[in-house]
Amino acid sequence: MTFIDLFEFVFRFAMGASSMATWIWVAITLIFFIFLIGSLWGKAWNKDWSLTRHGGFLAMILFFAFSAALAVFNLRTIARMEDWFKEQRTTLPQAIADSGRLKRSVIVETWNRLEPKKDQQELTSPDQSGDQVRLNTSEDAVVLASVAAEEARGALRTKPPFAFGAPLDTKSPGDIASETVDSLKLDPSAFPRTVSSQNEWTTTAATIQVNHALDTAEGLLAPRLADLKIACLWLLGLSVAIPIVFGAIRALDDIKVNPKP
């Protein structure tokens, strides 16, 4: 992820998931620069100071005001992102695993893979509104879990933070299926069995896939966001320091050019 990609991700995240407090802080920053640093700071050195009479300094104040606002915008968004990721660990796996669209897609694709074995007799096919498949062996359960992992990977692309541009790294369906079967620990004697779209293999596989994607995305983003945070702190500091120094100098120069009688 390049720095430009990171900026785009932060901006899209802010547009989609940031709070109103972020925009309030941006507005406060702009007001602080224009009125306090641009106007009142000059008057502290020169009572006759007027920002509107100094077009060059006004342009500089506006430039650094928007630079500081950008820094504050990014800093607030990054801070919000940490809490947001914690929330997603609770809500996103459940949202995807419980998705009716995902569960239906899993049943349809699993049927298509198992039906050629001629082991689905007496069940209604999905194209006739059927909602069940028969798992005759643990290998069939692996197929079901593998399909669920594939479908979960596809669903993640349309969900935040991945829809905002976060890197999406998922495990192979085979690995997820193996983890799913191992975690459920069902005895081979439990087969054959008929399952509906609401089943433990689909839920477990989707949850494992989503959690892995979130863990990986957060791990990849963390150092990049830390670098961006440092850069924004420097930008904010310089945006404050430079106008303060030049504002005082400009106000004192104004006294020399236009001394009081």
Image (tube, rainbow, N blue to C red):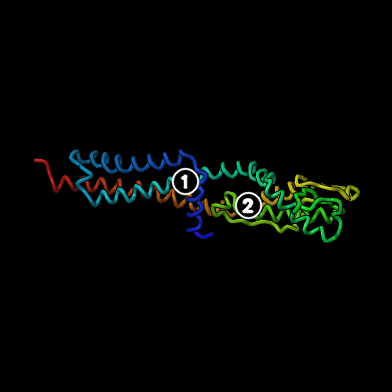
Disc 2 to disc 1, C-alpha distance:
26 Å
Q: Which mark is residue 53?
A: none
Coordinates of residue 136 in the picture (x, y in percent):
87, 53
Q: In the displayed image of the protein, which residue is found farthest to the front?
A: 128
The quadrant in which residue 86 appears is top right
Indicate the secondary structure of the residue bearing disc 1: helix
The answer to whether 116 appears left or right of 38 in the picture is right
Coordinates of residue 72 in the picture (x, y in percent):
43, 45
In front here: 227 or 170? 170
Q: Are marks 2 and 1 in contact (CB under 8 Å)?
A: no
The answer to whether 126 appears left or right of 13 in the picture is right
- Three-letter code for the amino acid on which mark 2 is drawn: Leu
- Look at the picture and state if 123 lies above or below 49: below
Residue at figure coordinates x 63%, y 50% from the top left: 214
Mark in the foreground, 2 or 1: 2
Coordinates of residue 172 in the picture (x, y in percent):
71, 59
Residue at figure coordinates x 48%, y 52% from the top left: 228
In front here: 144 or 215? 144
Quadrant in which the C terminus is drawn: top left
- Three-letter code for the amino acid on which mark 1 is drawn: Leu
Q: In the displayed image of the protein, which residue is found farthest to the right?
A: 189
Density class for disc 1 (Cα within 10 Å; few <14, some 14-19, many ≥20) is many
Residue at figure coordinates x 15%, y 47% from the top left: 256
The residue to which callout 2 is attached is 156
The residue to which callout 1 is attached is 75
The answer to whether 177 appears left or right of 55 in the picture is right
Density class for disc 2 (Cα within 10 Å; few <14, some 14-19, many ≥20) is many
Quadrant in which the N terminus is drawn: bottom right
Coordinates of residue 87 in the picture (x, y in percent):
60, 41
Q: How many marks?
A: 2
Indicate the secondary structure of the residue bearing disc 2: helix
